[in-house]
Image (cartoon, helix red, strand yellow):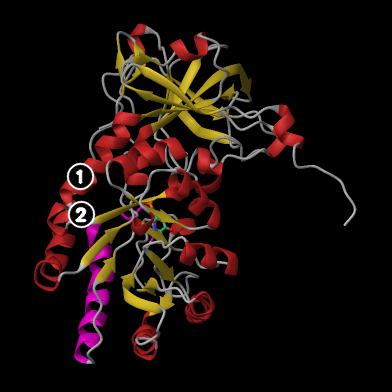
């Protein structure tokens, strides 16, 4: 459940009517976040997995504003990072670095060194060569580091978008399951690099708990094999990929995921003291944000109605890149089109089918195709929902558009948490000098 609701005929974010922001002069498009939705989602995920006493490492790549990270850190969240840049931002937040896990197939020497020196909780190892490199660097630094081996479990959810599948055979992520046992055996006694456990992340979003169960069964099997060889692991990281509510604002039943996963892992926690790590991104962040954009023009092309917004693929690339669905609705619809509940498809009379597009000079720049909406007029403010994950983090300057502001609402307080870029920012690093 998120805190973007229609009240008195207009869309509210917590206690603030959304249209009041552009009406006060805030330029569109902008991202708008609900702090209390963020907090509630974190607590919800924690509570459904509470029996596992999990360490919840929020996936920073899904939503990386330091002020949003601070809200989660204040609740005790750890962070899941995938680059030195993310480590840098996390260091500016209040997050506990011992609760940071560092994944990614292509970590550079600088990133690995930074992670070791910063004493992050765990580095997730994604190849044999990476493990060797971490051993060399930790040896040179004479510093200990805990690592998890990311297995490639050969688990495929066909419903996950092809571009965000990560657990199938032949994927670039993790280490081939068949090689992992020998690798851990051979490297169990390194003086600086301690192999503490296993990691798996099979894609995003995952449609059923059964895929997690399949991946966890493979992890558990390895744990048992190694135990027989007297090699003890004590950490299992089951990754992220839990779904978000894109079609509606009902609570997705995360409980249905937690039950079977908990059942499998609980004995390891209770009897053997295992630490369980989760890396949720979108399930926490997606429904925390909307993009507010304005109708610039409405026109007809053949028999198509086209609405042109001032925000598009440069702010939100998910429709162009993944053919992703985002619920779209006017911030202040005509009274007969006010929504009691967000739920697609909307059961209302008198809607017009639009292609909803942005201003960028490219046909992939759309936010929705053939979408039934109330009649739209120039100047209407439009909300694009469920953009808190993989939204602003993927914004670009294509066509030299400035990247938008980010606003956070906490009950009746409004905070700017990222300034809109200026046109000076666009040329700031275009400095010519001879090398
Ligand atoms: C992207 C990613 C996640 C988060 O995925 P969500 O679908 O946003 O939950 C977690 N772990 C790793 C390693 C990732 O790359």
Looking at the image, which is closer to me, 372 or 15? 15
Tag 1–tag 2 contact (CB < 8 Å) = yes
Give the crowd class for mark 1: few <14, some 14-19, many >=20 residues within 10 Å: few
Locate residue 285, reporting x and y percent.
37, 40
Locate residue 433, reporting x and y percent.
88, 49
> Is residue 257 depicted above or below 11 in this figure?
below
Residue under the point 10% across and 69% down: 267
Q: Is residue 97 visible?
A: yes
Magenta residue check for 215: yes
Locate residue 392, reporting x and y percent.
51, 38
Residue under the point 34% across and 30% down: 35
Q: Residue furthest right?
A: 434
- Range of the magenta residues? 203-228
Corner quadrant of residue 33: top left
Q: Residue furthest front?
A: 142
Mark 2 = which residue? 257
Locate residue 174, reporting x and y percent.
43, 72
> Is residue 164 depicted above or below 247 in this figure?
below
Question: Which mark identifies residue 253?
Answer: 1
């Amino acid at each position: 459940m998120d805190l973007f609701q229609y009240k008195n005929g207009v869309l509210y974010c917590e206690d603030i009517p959304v249209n009041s922001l552009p009406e006060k002069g805030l330029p569109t498009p902008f991202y708008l976040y609900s702090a209390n939705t963020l907090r509630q989602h974190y607590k919800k995920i924690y509570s459904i997995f509470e029996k596992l006493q999990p360490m919840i490492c929020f996936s920073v790549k899904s939503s990386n504003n330091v002020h949003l990270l601070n809200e989660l850190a204040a609740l005790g969240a750890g962070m899941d990072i995938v680059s030195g840049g993310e480590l840098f931002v996390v260091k500016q937040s209040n997050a506990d670095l011992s609760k940071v896990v560092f994944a990614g197939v292509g970590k550079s020497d600088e990133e690995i060194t930074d992670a070791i020196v910063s004493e992050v909780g765990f580095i997730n190892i994604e190849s044999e060569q990476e493990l060797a490199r971490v051993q060399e660097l930790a040896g040179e630094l004479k510093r200990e580091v805990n690592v998890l081996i990311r297995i490639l479990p050969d688990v495929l959810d066909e419903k996950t978008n092809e571009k965000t599948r990560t657990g199938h055979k032949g994927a670039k992520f993790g280490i081939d399951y068949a090689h992992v046992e020998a690798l851990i055996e051979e490297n169990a006694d390194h003086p600086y690099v301690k192999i503490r456990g296993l990691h798996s992340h099979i894609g995003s979003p995952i449609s059923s708990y059964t895929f997690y169960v399949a991946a966890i069964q493979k992890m558990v099997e390895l744990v048992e094999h190694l135990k027989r060889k007297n090699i003890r692991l004590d950490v299992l990281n089951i990754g992220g990929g839990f779904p978000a509510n894109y079609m509606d604002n009902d609570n997705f039943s995360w409980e249905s995921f937690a039950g079977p996963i908990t059942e499998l892992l609980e004995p390891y926690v209770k009897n053997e003291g295992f630490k369980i790590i989760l890396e949720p991104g979108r399930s926490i962040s997606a429904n925390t944000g909307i993009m507010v954009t304005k109708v610039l023009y409405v026109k007809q092309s053949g028999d198509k109605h086209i609405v042109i917004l001032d925000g598009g693929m440069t702010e939100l690339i998910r429709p162009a890149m993944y053919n992703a669905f985002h619920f779209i609705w006017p911030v202040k619809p005509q009274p007969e089109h006010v929504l009691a509940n967000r739920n697609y498809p909307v059961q209302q009379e008198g809607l017009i089918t639009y292609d909803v597009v942005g201003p960028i000079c490219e046909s992939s720049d759309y936010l929705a195709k053939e979408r039934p909406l109330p009649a739209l007029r120039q100047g209407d403010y439009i909300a694009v929902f469920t953009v808190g994950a993989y939204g602003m983090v993927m914004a670009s300057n294509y066509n030299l558009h400035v990247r938008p502001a980010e606003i956070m609402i906490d009950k009746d307080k409004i905070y700017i948490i990222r300034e809109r870029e200026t046109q000076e920012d666009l040329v700031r690093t275009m400095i010519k000098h001879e090398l």
